[in-house]
Image (cartoon, helix red, strand yellow):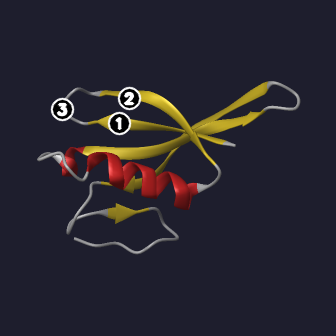
């Protein structure tokens, strides 16, 4: 499972940590979470590592932007589409 965090620009911090099977599932969960927020463009989703439940090992990684914002103005990572 991959580990993700939501970064809030105004608060200048991330959290909470959550897990998803892949980036697409994480994007869907992120968009569902922030779509009702009037400031959805201020949030970004980052992949921050992986967890292996068999070995009970968490492997951190450098934060990687998965998607920024929501609605009409969102930006996906370099393999996704960019909408502005």
Q: Residues within 10 Å of mark 3 (few under 14, many from 20)?
A: few
Q: Dividing the picture into quarters, in which one does residue 2 lie?
A: top right
Residue 42 percent coordinates (x, y): 21, 44
The N terminus lies in quadrant: top right
Q: Residue at x 51, y 51 (%)?
A: 26
Residue under numbered circle 1: 7
The span from disc 1 to disc 3 (Cα, nearest Å) is 9 Å
Q: Which mark is residue 10?
A: 3
Residue at point 20% right, 69% down?
Answer: 72
Regarding mark 1 in the picture, which secondary structure is present there?
A: strand
**Above or below: residue 69 compared with residue 58:** below
On the rendered structure, is 2 left or right of 74? right
Mark 2 lies on a secondary structure that is strand
Name the residue that disc number 2 marks: 14
Query: Which quadrant, please, contains the C terminus?
Result: bottom left
Question: Cβ–Cβ below 8 Å for labels 3 and 2?
Answer: no
Report x, y in % for residue 27. Answer: 45, 56
In the rendered image, residue 41, in percent from the top left (x then y), is placed at 20, 51
Q: Residue at x 34, y 53 (%)?
A: 32
Q: Which mark is residue 67?
A: none
Residue density around tag 1, few if under 14, some if 14–19, many if 20 or more, within 10 Å: some
Residue lying furthest right: 55
In the picture, measured across the screen, residue 79 lies left or right of residue 1, that is left
């Amino acid at each position: 499972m991959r580990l993700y965090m939501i970064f809030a620009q105004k608060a200048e911090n991330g959290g909470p940590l959550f897990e998803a099977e892949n980036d697409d599932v994480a994007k869907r969960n992120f968009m569902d979470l922030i779509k009702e927020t009037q400031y959805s463009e201020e949030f970004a989703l980052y992949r921050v590592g992986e967890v292996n439940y068999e070995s009970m090992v968490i492997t951190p990684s450098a934060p990687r932007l998965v998607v920024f914002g929501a609605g009409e103005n969102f930006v996906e990572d370099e393999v996704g589409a960019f909408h502005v």
